[in-house]
Image (cartoon, rainbow, N blue to C red):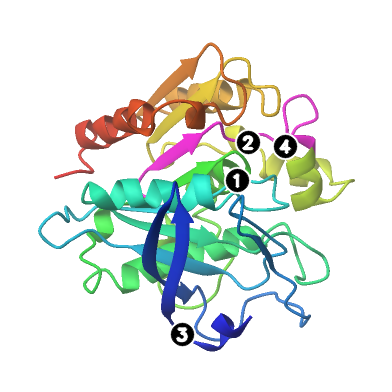
Amino acid sequence: MQMRLFSCLLFFVMVSGIVFAQQTIPVYEKSIPGAIPAPDEEKFDSVNLVTSRVSVPTITIYLPEKEKANGAAVLICPGGGYGGLVIGKEGYRIAQYFSDRGVAAFVLKYRLPDDKIMKDKSVGPLQDAQQAIRLIKQHAGQWNVDTARIGIMGFSAGGHLASTAGTHFDRPVITGKQLAGVRPRFMILVYPVISMTDSLGHPGSRNNLLGRNPSSQTITLFSNELQVTPQTPPAFLIHAGDDKKVDVDNSILFYEALRRNNVPAEMHIYPKGDHGFVFKMPLEQWMGLCMEWMKESGYLH
């Protein structure tokens, strides 16, 4: 795509009938770590706002009006089972909501795991998330962001990526300076894939990220309920009890691990709604809870 040739551009996307113009920039200024040279085969479904075959990661920037900006920022990771990105509903729409309320938001279009385009597909998405956090910090002054209030949000498999960023920050998978700067200050996890275990993991997400026959050590490493420490960032979790795609126990076990490690966390479990249930209700109904948690936790000033 021609957009790859530019360091930044205006990106137009239609969500709920409204057209927003936003700046999109590449996650990496130079070479992409661990990338294998291959044709760019990215596809975008303009009807459903779903992206697939991503090999060149970007962030789309939603900055609030200066008089509204409160300094908080959220990096948003859409879901899609590590096989696609539901970037409209779980990315742009949420970013606009945050921006309208003074929070800088950044939609991460991360690389989708594929042995044809990356040397180690298990760490490709995490490299992009860590670099995106570092990129936001590097431009904090320009974007009116407080580096102490940069969080990460993820939906479904994007929730796995977000929780991996929150539990693997002490094992950076990118090189260069400021490696200590990849820890998000908080996590917002919406019907997240957390575990990669046989009993709890989402098979599609696991197969796409780790392959069909991952070792027990790899399964443990990417089962984030087993990676929580007292240094793990605080979290807000929301899930439906009848989720048939991603078992609610993903959120419950992660919450319990946070609680055992004295990490502040808030969890909301709705009895019904199945996967993606939050988009069957008014956005304010559940995002309002999220914003209230951010305020009470000190991330909104």
- The residue sitting at the left extreme is 67
Q: Nearer the viewer, mark 4 or mark 1?
A: 1
Q: Are marks 1 and 2 in contact (CB under 8 Å)?
A: yes
- The residue sitting at the right extreme is 213
Q: Give the residue type at disc 2.
A: Val
> Could you give the CA–CA distance between mark 4 and mark 1, rounded to whole angstroms?
16 Å
- Residue at 66% x, 38% y is 223
Numbered badge on residue 79: 1
Q: Are marks 1 and 3 in contact (CB under 8 Å)?
A: no
> Could you give the CA–CA distance between mark 1 and mark 3, rounded to whole angstroms?
25 Å
Q: Give the residue type at disc 3.
A: Ser
Numbered badge on residue 7: 3
Q: Are marks 4 and 2 in contact (CB under 8 Å)?
A: no
Does the magenta portion include 279?
Answer: no
Q: Nearer the viewer, mark 2 or mark 3?
A: 3
Q: Residue 36: x and y, percent? A: 76, 78
Q: SS of the residue at dot 2?
A: loop
Tag 4 residue: 196
- Residue at 37% x, 67% y is 21
Q: Residue 199: x and y, percent? A: 78, 24
Numbered badge on residue 193: 2
Q: Residue 176: x and y, percent? A: 49, 78
**Part of the protein shown in magenta:** 184-203
Q: Are marks 4 and 3 in contact (CB under 8 Å)?
A: no
Question: Please, is residue 12 above or below residue 232 in the view?
Answer: below
> Could you give the CA–CA distance between mark 2 and mark 3, rounded to whole angstroms?
32 Å
The first of marks 1 and 3 along the sequence is 3
- The residue sitting at the front extreme is 17
Q: SS of the residue at dot 3?
A: loop
Label 2: few (<14), some (14–19) or many (≥20) C-alpha neighbours in 10 Å = many
Q: Residue 60: x and y, percent? A: 44, 65
